[in-house]
Image (spheres, rainbow, N blue to C red):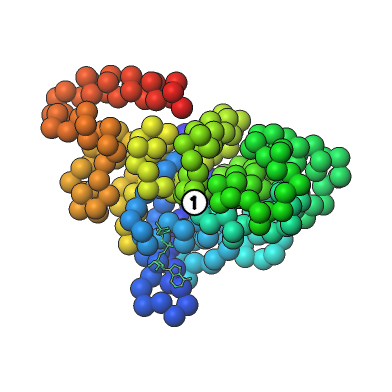
Amino acid sequence: MQEYLLEFEQVYYTYPGAQESALNGLTLKIPSGKRCALIGQNGCGKTTLFLLANGLYKPDSGIVRWRNEPLSYNRNYLSNLRQKVGLVFQDPEQQLVASTVEEDISYGLCNLGLPEPEIKDRVEQALVEFELTALAERPVHHLSLGQKKRVSIADVMVLHPELLVLDEPTAYLDVKHTRNLIATLKRIHRDGTTLLMATHDLDLVYRWADWVFVMDKGQLMLEGKPQHVFSQRTLLEELELGVPLIYEMLFDGLSTEEEVIIERVRQRILQLFRNFS
Ligand SMILES: Nc1ncnc2c1ncn2[C@@H]1O[C@H](COP(=O)(O)OP(=O)(O)OP(=O)(O)O)[C@@H](O)[C@H]1O
């Protein structure tokens, strides 16, 4: 039976002073073990959802649950939750806190009060994994945006979260580091972490995700496997989201009777993509 890590049930949230709700009765469940993508226009509520996911914001009404239990909003509970739900912000500047790369990555581990040798081991591992060893001593404010992005992901991954939530992780990354990030996410997922990524890159969604959520105006409009979601063309056009280029080029105009062939071609393309990336 499918288990869910995090659930939003009829969640409403309005920013102080705002006229309209950012989340408008959102009901959404994040399935354990999946690579989930979250898509939707600018301003549809993706970042707000993330800020509620680890308790940074509290719903005006509705419930957020972690492993079937409603979140509590006291300090101890939240500090525990934030180890399990790792959040990588869209803008790395919001995440970096310490003066050097090495110190920044060790910050969360020091807060947990882990023994010094364990902190050292984990930080070294993260520096290698995210190709940051050469930058370890570098002040964070001397880094490029892409390098800051890698540090902000390392900061979170070093805490070994059960659910990793990434807000547009490929923003600011060049092709090489986008590929490296996708390879890292593959590894993280293989090691048991559930992933939720907000992105506007539909081609990435098509080849990377195994579950897709589509949001509009603070609500969930559609969810499912990529093939199912991207076949709902009329709705996606209404929401002005479009479909992945590759999907458009290959499948546009084909009827559903040709589904078997479509599925075979799709699997072949995905296989090629995965070998390539
Ligand atoms: N601090 C804030 N104060 C007031 N309104 C806000 C604030 N942050 C976001 N909003 C509003 O809440 C709504 C949802 O914003 P949110 O940042 O969650 O969207 P998003 O889907 O992440 O957008 P994007 O794709 O551009 O990152 C928008 O209408 C936005 O203008």
Relative to 77, 241 lies left or right = left
Could you tell me which residue is drawn at 49 percent across and 51 percent down?
Answer: 167
Total marks in image:
1
Q: Nearer the viewer, residue 173 or 76?
A: 173
Q: Position of residue 170 (x, y in %)?
A: 48, 44
Disc 1 residue crowd, few under 14, some 14–19, many 20+, Cα 10 Å: some
Where is residue 82 shown, x and y percent of the image? 64, 54
Label 1 CB less than 8 angstroms from ligand 1: yes
Q: Ligand 1 falls in which quarter?
A: bottom left
Above or below 15: residue 148: above
- Under circle 1, the secondary element is strand
Query: In the rendered view, would you say 92 is above or below 130?
Result: below
Residue farthest along the bottom direction in this orientation = 17
Pointer 1 residue: 167
Determine the residue positioned at 35% across, 37% down.
203
Q: Position of residue 99 (x, y in %)?
A: 74, 57
Q: Amino acid at mark 1?
A: Asp
Report whether 117 appears left or right of 33. Answer: right
